[in-house]
């Protein structure tokens, strides 16, 4: 998978280039390139913003640097052919609190993409014509991390890249841990324990030491349901009817 990030704060993304994706990168599963938007300016001051037409608070990101940066990324796209169909266009993710809310299902979908470009904005956002123009060459997708506002999209991009890249086949140390984690099976994950069996007068639940695999599975599922009920009732009401079993209903 090829990932490009265009930002005025490339150093924000540096940890991703170094460590997180270290394994996925060195094994050739992910090629992450971070670009400095200011490298695509043409004035002495490397200006990326200007005052909004129509007035109002704050500054707006100028279209020209974004246009040049996106041109460059397209030129370097390893998957793009001149006859690229709609589905072969790279995906352009616009981080924005006004986008579709990111979740695990979206992370799974995105983990099958060949080329994703992230365009995190600062200030009041990017000149709208950049998005209109980009529709010709990209599939444009505004995405939000959740219902709150950040200074800019960089942190959102880091969160999305982590969530996406760990789902790429081969990028997880233990792929089985994916199938049991929160937000995969529709319930939150069960609590976990390790040695010692007693710590500060607190014992590990006895069933986990019993060696009875059926009882352990039952206990874990009960804990998942209890947790989801207490913390995320919204998820419980979305849980598919056919996934409940008779013992669950007795809870
Ligand atoms: Cl993607 N960007 C910004 N600036 N704020 C956000 C967000 C994104 N998602 C939630 N809040």
Image: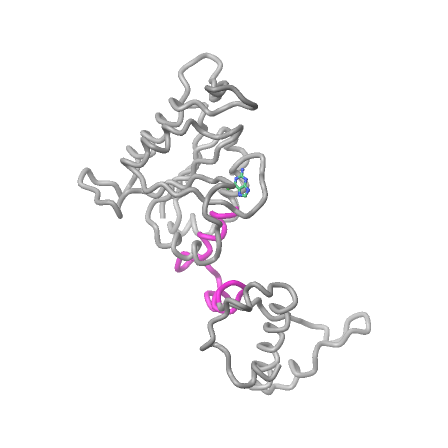
Residue 82 location (% of width, % of height): 19, 37
Q: Is residue 141 above or below residue 68?
A: below
Quarter of the C terminus within the rendering: bottom right
Exactly how many numbered labels are in the figure?
0
Residue 65 location (% of width, % of height): 40, 23
Q: Which picture quadrant has residue 250?
A: bottom right
What residue sits 45% from the left and 77% below the top? 242
**126 magenta-colored:** no
Residue 21 seen in this snapshot: no
The residue closer to the viewer here, 16 or 190, is 190
**175 magenta-colored:** yes
Q: Is residue 164 left or right of residue 229?
A: left
What residue sits 34% from the left and 45% below the top? 115
Q: Which picture quadrant has residue 33?
A: top left
Residue located farthest toward the top when viewing the structure as drawn: 44
Magenta stretch: give its range.
Answer: 159-184
Q: Is residue 110 above or below residue 133?
A: below
What residue sits 37% from the left and 29% below the top? 130
The residue closer to the viewer here, 195 or 88, is 88
Residue located farthest toward the left when viewing the structure as drawn: 83
The residue closer to the viewer here, 243 or 182, is 243
Q: Is residue 229 left or right of residue 47?
A: right
Residue 62 location (% of width, % of height): 43, 22
Residue 198 seen in this snapshot: yes
Residue located farthest toward the front when viewing the structure as drawn: 54
């Amino acid at each position: 998978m090829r990932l490009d990030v265009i930002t005025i704060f490339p150093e924000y993304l540096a940890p991703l280039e170094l460590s997180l994706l270290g394994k996925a990168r060195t094994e050739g599963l992910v090629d992450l390139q971070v670009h400095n938007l200011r490298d695509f300016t043409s004035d002495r001051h490397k200006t990326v913003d200007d005052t909004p037409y129509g007035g109002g608070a704050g500054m707006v990101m100028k279209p020209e640097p974004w246009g040049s940066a996106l041109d460059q990324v397209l030129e370097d796209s390893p998957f793009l052919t001149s006859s690229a169909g709609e589905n072969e266009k790279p995906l352009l993710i616009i981080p924005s609190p006004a986008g579709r809310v990111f979740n695990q299902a979206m992370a799974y979908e995105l983990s099958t993409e060949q080329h994703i470009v992230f365009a995190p904005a600062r200030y009041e956002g990017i000149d709208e014509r950049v998005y209109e123009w980009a529709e010709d060459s990209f599939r444009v997708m505004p995405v939000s991390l959740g219902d709150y506002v950040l200074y800019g999209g960089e942190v959102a991009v880091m969160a999305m890249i982590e969530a996406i890249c760990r789902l790429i086949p081969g990028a997880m140390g233990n792929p089985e841990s994916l199938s049991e984690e929160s937000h995969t099976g529709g319930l939150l994950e069960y609590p976990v324990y390790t040695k010692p069996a007693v710590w500060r007068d607190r014992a590990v639940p006895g069933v986990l030491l019993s060696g009875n695999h059926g009882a352990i599975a039952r206990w874990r599922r009960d804990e998942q349901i209890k947790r989801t009920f207490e913390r995320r009732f919204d998820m419980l009401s979305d849980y598919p009817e056919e996934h409940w079993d008779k013992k669950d209903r007795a809870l």
